[in-house]
Amino acid sequence: FEYGIIFIKTLKGDYITLRIDFECSGIIEILLYISWVFFFSVFTKYQKIVMSVVGFMYIIFINSMRIIIICEVIHFGGNGAYSVAHNIVGKLFFYVFIVLFVLFRSAVLFLCIYETTCIEYATWRFRVLG
């Protein structure tokens, strides 16, 4: 069993089969994010691990939501909506939320580089929430 397969019935009664392969699973984006986290030396090893785990869960969640949105667009729009659902709606949703997440982390990183209080806050936050 190599791929995830989803069967969708449209409102018109047609059926379409979606195959979730390696590129659609979000693995590439997860590896990219984890590499980005470990590249910067501002955070401690513990904080990097926490950020990696949180990012991993976030990317899995957003990718799952992307797949659900694609399925819903196809369900309501019919088989002809597949290209729009996958190439525009799904990718736009996924990348907007990934960029927002990375910008949030970048803002924290920027503040931690230039403000001592942020480092103290981040350390406290990871101790309490981590």
Image (cartoon, grey):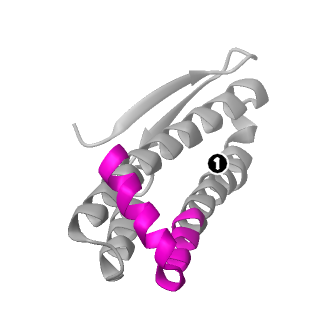
Q: Nearer the viewer, residue 122 or 88?
A: 122
Look at mark 1 in the image and give the residue it sits on: 90
Report whether 79 appears left or right of 124. Answer: right
Report whether 36 appears left or right of 69. Answer: left
Residue sitting at 55 percent across and 76 percent down? 111
Q: Amino acid at mark 1?
A: Gly
Residue 27 in sight: no
Q: Is residue 84 above or below residue 103?
A: above
Residue 96, picture quadrant: bottom right
Q: Nearer the viewer, residue 80 or 48?
A: 48
Asked whether 26 falls inside the magenta stretch, the response is no
Residue sitting at 30 percent across and 75 percent down? 38
Q: Which segment did they paint magenta?
A: 104-130
Q: Position of residue 95 (x, y in %)?
A: 61, 60
Residue 117 in sight: yes
Dot 1 surroundings within 10 Å: few (below 14), some, or many (20 or more)? many
**Count of labels in the image:** 1
Q: Secondary structure at mark 1?
A: helix
Q: Nearer the viewer, residue 91 or 84?
A: 91
Q: Position of residue 67 (x, y in %)?
A: 54, 39
Q: Main secondary structure of the magenta part?
A: helix
Residue sitting at 29 percent across and 66 percent down? 48
Residue sitting at 33 percent across and 73 percent down? 43
Q: Position of residue 31 (x, y in %)?
A: 33, 65
